[in-house]
Image (spheres, rainbow, N blue to C red):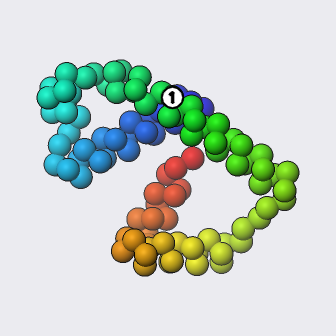
Amino acid sequence: MITEELNQMFNEFQQRLAQQGMNFELYSQILGQTEEDVKSQMGEDAEKRVRTRLTLEKIREVEGLKVDDEEVEKEFVAISKHTESNLNKLKNLSQSTP
């Protein structure tokens, strides 16, 4: 689980670089860091994310918390308006995040 999260975080990092007009190769050359170096720095955060997600899932299970599709849709619409983000992009992002 942690490895999957770490890979997800690294992919998100590469996407942020691309949004800034840079690829990882160039980043690596400028800072002298390899993929392994960057992932090593992300390791603790990846572990925290996994622990947090597992804790929240357990709380949801124990408390019997449920959210219906209509509530989720309303929240997506509210977030997209607040952040001026594309609704479909938000939905896709949420589905790609474990």
| Residue receiving disc 1 | 44
As drawn, 25 above or below 83:
above
* Residue 31 in sight from this viewpoint: yes
Residue type, numbered disc 1: Glu
As drawn, 91 above or below 78:
above
Q: Quadrant of residue 52?
A: top right
In terms of depth relative to the viewer, which is nearer, 56 or 3? Answer: 56
In terms of depth relative to the viewer, which is nearer, 84 or 7? Answer: 84
Residue 80 image offset from top left, x and y in percent:
44, 73
* Quadrant, the N terminus: top right
Who's the residue at 57% across and 40% down the image? 49
Who's the residue at 79% across and 61% down the image? 65
* Residue 4 in sight from this viewpoint: no
Residue 32 image offset from top left, x and y in percent:
19, 22
Q: Quadrant of residue 48?
A: top right
Who's the residue at 58% across and 78% down the image? 74
Residue 34 image offset from top left, x and y in percent:
27, 22
Mark 1, secondary structure of its residue: helix
As drawn, 18 above or below 46:
below
